C-alpha cells in the first residue's frame, strides 16, 4: 500500500512539472531572471555530458543538479570543482554529504563566483559623459542545506534549501546632479526539489527537478526573480541490453529543460566507462547560441578493499564564436 501511494505521489509530481511546460511552449522569454550565475553548469562530469545529468546525478555533486542523487551507499562524500568561465570569470563549488542510514542523507554545499576587479562609473555632464568611481569587486555566492531519502525501492527524493547572495557594489540612483548612493546587494532564499525514479527496466532511470523556487524581491528599483528552471530527463546504460554482466558501460542521458528566461532546451550526453576506472564523455545541447558541444574525461582509481573512493574529472566547452573555451576540473572522494 505504501509503495502504491508513493508511486501516485510521483505521478502527481510529474504532472505538476509537465503542465507548466506545455502551457508556455513557444513564448519568447529573455531577460526575465536575475543572478544569472545560478545558471552556470556546476561540475566537470555533468558539463562534459552536455548538462544531461538530472537522472545521472549522484554523490555530493548531485546537490547542484538533482538533490535526490545524494542518496547513495557512501557514508561521507566530498566534492569540489573549479570552472574557468568566459570573460575571465572564475566559478567554484564544494559539497559534503553524510549518510545517516534510515534517517536519510544530509548535505551542505557552497558555490561562489569571482568576477575580478571592475572599474565603476556614473553619469556626468562633463565630457565624455561619465566619471570614474574607482574599482570594485562584485561578489556572488550561494550556500545550501540538502536532504535526500529513499522513499521506496524505486523512488528517491531530495531537496536543497539555499540562500543566494549578490553584491554588485554601489548604485547611483536619481538624476545626474541629484542622486543617491545605495548598496547594490541582495539575498534571496530559494529551494530545489528533485526525484529519481527507477523504472525497473534494466537500469533505466527518470529524473526531475524544480530549481530556484523563490519569490520576487525588490533590487534597487526593479523586481528581481531567480532563474527558475524545470528539468526532466532519462538515463540508461545501453550496453546492459547487449551484455548485462560486461566490464564496460555506456550511459545515454537526455534532459529537457524549461527555464524562466529562455526557450525550451534539449541536452544529450553520453559516458563510456572502462572497468569503472576510465570515463570518456561527450554531449550536445540544442537551442543554444554558442555553448553546444562538450567533451571530457574522468579517472577513478580503484584501491584494493576500498573500491573507487577517488574521482578526477575534466570538461572542455569550445563556446563557439566567443573565442574563450571553458575549462572545468572537479575532484571528489567518498568513504
Image: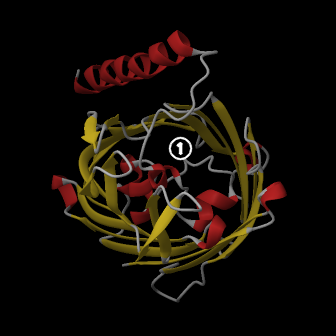
Image coords of residue 78 (percent x, y): 38, 75
Secondary element at tag 1: loop
Q: Can residue 181 be seen in this view?
A: yes
Q: Give the quarter of the figure containing the C terminus.
A: bottom left
* Rendering quarter of residue 7: top left
* Rendering quarter of residue 25: top right
Image coords of residue 165 (percent x, y): 29, 58
| Above or below: residue 23 compared with residue 316 | above
Residue at image coords 41%, 74%? 137
Q: Nearer the viewer, residue 186 or 271?
A: 186
| Above or below: residue 32 compared with residue 212 | above
Residue on which disc 1 sits: 55
Image coords of residue 148 (percent x, y): 28, 50
Q: Is residue 167 visible?
A: no
| Above or below: residue 332 compared with residue 192 | below
Would you say 144 lies left or right of 299 here? left
Would you say 269 lies left or right of 54 here? right
Residue at image coords 55%, 56%? 41
Image coords of residue 196 (percent x, y): 44, 40
Amino acid at each position: 500500500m505504501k509503495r502504491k501511494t508513493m508511486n501516485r505521489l510521483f505521478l502527481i509530481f510529474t504532472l505538476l512539472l509537465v503542465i507548466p511546460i506545455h502551457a508556455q511552449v513557444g513564448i519568447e522569454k529573455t531577460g526575465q531572471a536575475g543572478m544569472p550565475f545560478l545558471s552556470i553548469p556546476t561540475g566537470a562530469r555533468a558539463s562534459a555530458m552536455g548538462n544531461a545529468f538530472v537522472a545521472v546525478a549522484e554523490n555530493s555533486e548531485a546537490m547542484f543538479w538533482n538533490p535526490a542523487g545524494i542518496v547513495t551507499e557512501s557514508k561521507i562524500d566530498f566534492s569540489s570543482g573549479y570552472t574557468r568561465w568566459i570573460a575571465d570569470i572564475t566559478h567554484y563549488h564544494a559539497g559534503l554529504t553524510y549518510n545517516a542510514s534510515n534517517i536519510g542523507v544530509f548535505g551542505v554545499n557552497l558555490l561562489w563566483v569571482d568576477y575580478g576587479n571592475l572599474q565603476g562609473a556614473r553619469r556626468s555632464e562633463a565630457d565624455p559623459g561619465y566619471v570614474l568611481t574607482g574599482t570594485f569587486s562584485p561578489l556572488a555566492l550561494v550556500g545550501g542545506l540538502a536532504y535526500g531519502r529513499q522513499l521506496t525501492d524505486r523512488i528517491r527524493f531530495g531537496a536543497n534549501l539555499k540562500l543566494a547572495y549578490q553584491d554588485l557594489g554601489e548604485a547611483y540612483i536619481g538624476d545626474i546632479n541629484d542622486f543617491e548612493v545605495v548598496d547594490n546587494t541582495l539575498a534571496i532564499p530559494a529551494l530545489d526539489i528533485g526525484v529519481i525514479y527507477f523504472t525497473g527496466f534494466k537500469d533505466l532511470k527518470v529524473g526531475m527537478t524544480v530549481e530556484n523556487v523563490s519569490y520576487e524581491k525588490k533590487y534597487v528599483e526593479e523586481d528581481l526573480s531567480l532563474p527558475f528552471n524545470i528539468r526532466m530527463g532519462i538515463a540508461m546504460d545501453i550496453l546492459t541490453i547487449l551484455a548485462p554482466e560486461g566490464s564496460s558501460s555506456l550511459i545515454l542521458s537526455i534532459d529537457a529543460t524549461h527555464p524562466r528566461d529562455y526557450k525550451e532546451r534539449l541536452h544529450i550526453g553520453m559516458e563510456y566507462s572502462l572497468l569503472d576506472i576510465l570515463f570518456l564523455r561527450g554531449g550536445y545541447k540544442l537551442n543554444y547560441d554558442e555553448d553546444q558541444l562538450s567533451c571530457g574525461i574522468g579517472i577513478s582509481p580503484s584501491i584494493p578493499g576500498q573500491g573507487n573512493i577517488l574521482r578526477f574529472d575534466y570538461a572542455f566547452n569550445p563556446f563557439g564564436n566567443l573565442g574563450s573555451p571553458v575549462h572545468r576540473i572537479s575532484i571528489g572522494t567518498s568513504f
